[in-house]
Image (spheres, grey):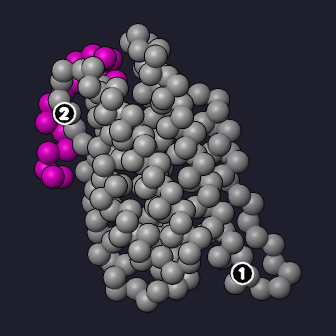
């Protein structure tokens, strides 16, 4: 599929908007395929639950985006090949890592990266929705962006907690950046 990442050029802001919606919807479908493998590879029950919750969020938002896309006649011209490659290759590599802290931290990084790939598309889609006359899509896109930030914050907290458990006594943990992510989503 990676060879089909871009098959035509964009000619207008409405074209770009629809392509962003397709990108977000396809990202969700890819997560629906790959996140169950990540969740089953997690040794930490909290991480496995968080990954399954991401799966539920992806399912909900993918359905909502499909509804938005049902009003447009043009098919997707692009899809997120990078996300597909990231999750597919990570899932294969996790099979070689022993269950435990290292694999769980790697799972957190991969999951957070997958979630982060949707941030620029959702931010631009919100801006373009107003610009090209789809104000009725804003609430749906805001909920998507909010859930992306919340999922990221939860995964970050899980990773930080796992790392902090191994810090030498008296060494402070690094401050979280999740609050910055959440606030930037609220500003849009």
Q: Is residue 186 above or below residue 59?
A: above
The Cα–Cα distance between marks 2 and 1, rounded to whole angstroms, is 46 Å
| Position above or below: 184 against 10 | below
Residue at x 49% of width, y 22% of height: 138
Q: Is residue 60 left or right of residue 13?
A: right
The residue segment tinted magenta is 1-17
Q: Which residue is mark 2?
A: 77
Image point 34% across, 47% down: which residue? 27
Is residue 15 visible from the viewing direction of this image? no
Q: Which residue is mark 1?
A: 165
Q: Estimate the x, y position of residue 161 in percent, counting from the top left.
A: 69, 72
Whether residue 110 is in magenta: the answer is no
Residue 36 picture quarter: bottom left
User: Which residue is drawn at the image coordinates 34% and 26% (left, top)?
Assistant: 68
- In the image, is residue 5 part of the stretch drawn in magenta? yes
Q: Residue 46's spot in the image, x, y percent?
A: 59, 70
């Amino acid at each position: 599929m990676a060879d089909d990442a871009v098959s035509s050029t964009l000619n207008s802001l409405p074209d770009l908007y629809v392509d962003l919606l397709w990108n977000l919807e396809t990202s969700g479908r890819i997560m629906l395929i790959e996140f169950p493998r990540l969740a089953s590879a997690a040794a930490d029950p909290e991480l496995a639950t968080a990954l399954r919750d991401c799966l539920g969020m992806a399912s909900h938002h993918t359905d909502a985006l499909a509804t938005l896309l049902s009003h447009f006649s043009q098919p997707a011209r692009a899809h997120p090949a990078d996300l597909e490659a990231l999750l597919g290759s990570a899932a294969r590599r996790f099979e070689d890592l022993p269950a435990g802290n290292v694999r769980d931290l790697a799972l957190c990084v991969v999951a957070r990266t997958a979630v982060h790939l949707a941030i620029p598309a959702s931010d631009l889609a919100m801006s373009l929705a107003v610009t090209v006359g789809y104000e009725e899509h804003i609430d749906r896109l805001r909920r998507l962006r909010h859930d992306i930030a919340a999922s990221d914050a939860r995964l970050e907290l899980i990773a930080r907690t796992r790392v902090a458990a191994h810090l030498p006594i008296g060494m402070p943990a690094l401050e979280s950046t999740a609050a910055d992510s959440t606030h930037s989503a609220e500003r849009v």
